[in-house]
Amino acid sequence: MSIQDHLPALIVMLPLLGAFLTPAVASLGKKIRNIFFVLFSFLILLVALSIGCAVFWGSPMVYVMGGDSFAIALPSGMSYPVRILFEIDAFGALLALCIAIASFAGALFSVAYMDKFSGWKKYLSLYFMLTAGALGMCVTGDLFNFFVFVEISSIASFGLVAFWRDKPEAIEASFKYMLVSQIAAMLLLIAIGTLYGKYNSVTMAALSSMMADGFLERVVLALVLCVLAFKCGAFPMHAWMPDAYAEAPTGVTCLLVTVSQASFYGLIRVCYSIFPKIAAGGVVGWILIVFGCMSMFFGVMMAVVQHEIKRLMGYHSISQVGYMLLALGVGLVAMSDQQNMIAYGFTAMKGGLFHAVNYSMYKALLFLCAGSLYYATGTRNLDKMGGLARNMPWTAGMFVIAAAAISGLPPFNGFVSKWMIYESSFAIHPILPTIAMITSVLTLASFAKVFQAAFLGPAKTGFVAVREAPGFMLAGMAVLTVATLLLTFFPGWFISNIFEKAAGALVDNASYVRAVMGGI
Amino acid sequence: MTDLIVETTLDTLGNFAYVAVALLILMALYTMLTQKNLIKICVAIAVLGSSVNMFLVLLGYRDGGEIPIYFLKGENASMVLPTPQCLTLTAIVIALATTALMLSFVILLHKHYGTLDIDEIRRLRG
């Protein structure tokens, strides 16, 4: 077997190796530690990229731990499916790539941002652990394994949100996040256990091929939907999100954005690939649409009144997740009817996936800009900032790009993906794009306020000597800016080469099953 | 008629462990919703975790089954399922880690706020 075949294992193994190597490497000195941190993150990015290339222009990858087939054959001739397997299709590879990019950018940023703090060994270990958990969620083909990766990423994020443990707010945010997160995780485990009890398997593809429509399955689907909607911050269960995002060190917030995307991956995977018979058409799709609309609207309403820059962006995250839920909900509603799927459902799904990638890039960039403002000025309160564009031209420039993209101004990438969502959701009900457009306008208003408050106007006394953020922080931001600009300049190429394949992989549930189970 | 009653009673008794799991989960959720003390909430989370583990072990239980190790299985041919036990072991380790972390947060919260009442720990609002 060549190294190519082992890529799915490497993408989880590398960050885990990084997590446990760090304590040793970090004691070799500051410089070696920084080089290790950045190079290792870059290595993970390379692995994610090569998986992406292999999957987008090839077939889904299946990797079985410790064997060729996921079933074990006993001497008596009986075959029993026990092995853990990783399955990466175009959708999983897409989100894994997003996570790897954000992780690399966050690593570059953290090198300078965390420089003056102690506790580097713990920070690095948890950082790699969080990356491993999030990547694992996107590549696993086993529901229990999914739960384990959810827990790895959750526990790492509890530790990182509370990293500045002498700040009461940080501990409080982390504790509250932990309470609800643990309840959610246990409900997820009950759901997985119930499925195991009925179908005798936790492999996603095997479950999908056996799945019947019944009361028990519906209860399980409802539980999983609630848990994962909570994990990606949909409206009625959003309260942890702004707290945790605001209090985590900024390099981590950038990664947390993509971790919530990994939960989004789980949600969509469960709806489209495991329960397609129950979820297609009607109810489940509308539930996602309603979740999405509420998150969009209430998220942005709460964001507009904020004065604290990272909290404001945290509320915007809720509203952005709403767009994706809306789009994929529209896709589910259309899925039961081939005609509707061609007419608008597929566009909605492409738009939703495009938005998911856009969101990870520009949102992570916005958080890094906020972090660099905090680094330079020592405050997160917008009322105290002012006139910083003169002192921090690079940060200001990159902030403008990200803010224009998130508000959906043409020609930026946010405009393209939002337009695809408006267009397709209109076919279901005109009220949906109306809510989405109002949200978009309010987003623009809110970011215009941030830009005006932080960067324009007379320089505030005390901030005259403020200097531009150090090179490593700018480099981290530049990585995400380049990604945003690439998506802006070549949306057509990305849509036809990547998002179409990812959406196709979701719709074609049979191919997901076939990759593991063979020709059934 | 009496046969039916006896049979139903036996069935219910056979499922009694599941009823216990459901009761434990409900108790844990009730405690979390009504109690204000952080330590009590942590205990409730731990109870929730344990009851879910019990549910997993129950799923693999076979009446009169032996331990699922081939050499030690004895005369009886039926064994309990090993997979849920592996799942439970993993879940126990995870629950241990979260409980430890959660209790350490409680210590830090008590240091910062001087109270364990969850209503008074609310600096993050709006």
Image: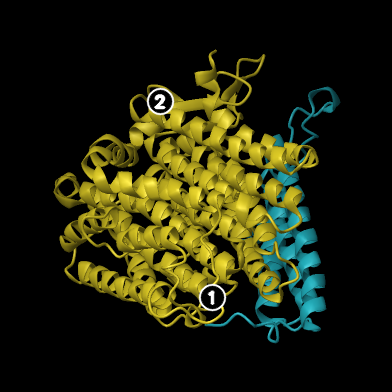
Q: Residue furthest front?
A: A465
Chain holding disc 1: A
**Which of the two residues, A147 or A245, is positioned nearer the viewer here?**
A245
Chain holding disc 2: A
Q: Which residue is mark 2?
A: A54
The N terminus of chain A, quarter of image: top right
Q: Earlier in the sequence, mark 1 or mark 2?
A: 2
**Residue at image x 66%, y 53%?**
A156
Q: Amino acid at mark 1?
A: Phe
Mark 1 closeness class: few <14, some 14–19, many ≥20 residues within 10 Å: some
Q: Position of residue A421 (x, y in %)?
A: 24, 57
Q: Secondary structure at mark 1?
A: loop
Q: Amino acid at mark 2?
A: Ala
Q: Is residue A189 visible?
A: no
Shown colour of chain B: cyan
Q: Is residue A364 visible?
A: yes
**Would you identify the image quadrant in which residue A513 lies?**
top left
Q: Position of residue A395 (x, y in %)?
A: 44, 60
**Residue at image x 27%, y 34%?**
A497
Is A446 placed above or below B51 here? below
Real-space Cα separation, disc 1 to disc 2, in angstroms? 50 Å
